[in-house]
Image: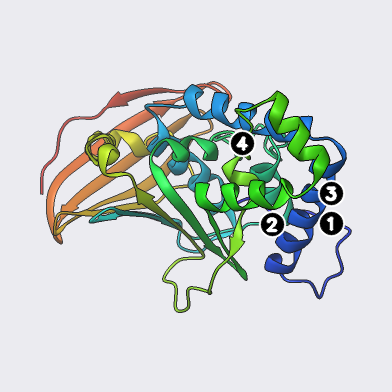
Amino acid sequence: MTRETQTLEPQNLTMNDIIIKKIEARKRGYLNEPELILQGFRDETNEIEGYHGRELLELLQNAVDELGAATNRHVCIELSGNILRFSNNGSVFSQDGITSLMYSHLSPKHNDQTYIGNKGTGFRSVLNWANGVRIYSGDLSIEFNPVFAEELLNELLKDENIKNYQIRHPDLKVATLVAPQIIPQLFQKAYDTVIELDVKEAMLDDVQAQINKIDARTLLFLDELERLTIIQNEEKIVFDKTTTVKTEEQRLVSITTYVNDDITDFDEWCRFSPKMTACISLPMAEEMY
């Protein structure tokens, strides 16, 4: 879920083709320098731990960052059983976006102040929750899974150089996000990008707790987001936001909350910011429908 950027890849290659080429390049790098295997795994582990407790917020921020080109600036969070789906309209994954996942510290957002989230680094946080992560975006359809990483390691261990390195480093593992596999496309998507997580049983309560923390105020400073839908336990909550420009420094933000299509709340805030780089938000008088 990152903005399109120019690449040197032939234009007739699909995103899945590019993924296959990147995996092969990664294998060659590992065979030449086995140290990179352990370095990548340790980097991924450290980044996962650094984002524990705000996985959902990272996914939401990443989704909102891609809404700029969308006509309908909508995000949907759905928890069904142990499957968490995170969907958004807007820009689809580009080559740079995938590179930011497969290589640590290469986020295209790093120096872009228009982004809120931290693509790549923030996305790794969901590995706290998931046994597997699937991405359907444009013509991209891939899955990240620790099982695939283990399969890649077993393939690499056929090389004597890698085998000898493992003897010296028995904790050798491959990072999950460097070993994606191509999966069938998800057709008739309602959104431009869909991310699916197979949530670990032990983490379901944590996922639900983070979902339940979301309310109208969550949308206040997510400027691009106009509608957020949350579906779980046969309940659908929709937050609809409209923003009215009063002056250069003042915005009126109105958010209507629906539960199963019934209006349950209406909130208004007045946002102040000298140059819209930092904001203060004050609630208006409450008004119920």
- Measured as percent of width and height from the top left, residue 186 is found at 48, 73
Q: Amino acid at mark 4?
A: Lys
- Does dot 1 land on a helix, a strand or a loop? loop
Residue for point 82% across, 52% down: 25
Residue 46 versus residue 123: which sits nearer the camera? 46
Q: How many marks?
A: 4
Mark whose residue sits in front, 1 or 3: 3
Label 1–label 2 contact, CB within 8 A: yes
Among numbered discs 3 and 2, the one appearing first in the sequence = 3
Where does label 4 land, which residue?
A: 173
Sequence-wise, the earlier of marks 1 and 3 is 1
Task: Estimate the spatial distance between the alpha carbons at disc 4 and disc 2, rounded to whole Å.
Answer: 27 Å
Q: Kindly tell me whether residue 145 is visible in this rendering.
A: no
Tell me the number on the disc at residue 94.
2
Earlier-in-chain disc, 4 versus 2: 2
Q: Which residue is mark 1?
A: 7
Gap between marks 3 and 4 measured at Cα: 16 Å
Relative to 142, residue 220 above or below: above
| Nearest to the observer: residue 208 or residue 76 | 208
Which element carries disc 2, helix, strand or loop? loop
Residue located beneath label 3 in the image: 28
The amino acid on which the numbered mark 1 sits, given as a three-letter code, is: Thr
Q: CA distance from mark 1 to mark 2?
A: 9 Å
Q: Which numbered disc flags the more N-terminal residue, 3 or 4?
A: 3
**Of the numbered discs in the image, which one, if any, rests on residue 49?**
none
Query: Which residue corresponds to the image point at 63% horizontal and 40% vertical from the top-left?
Result: 174
Comparing labels 4 and 2, the label whose residue is closer to the camera: 4
Q: Position of residue 182 (x, y in %)?
A: 60, 66
- Kind of residue sitting beneath label 3: Arg
Q: Is residue 93 visible?
A: yes
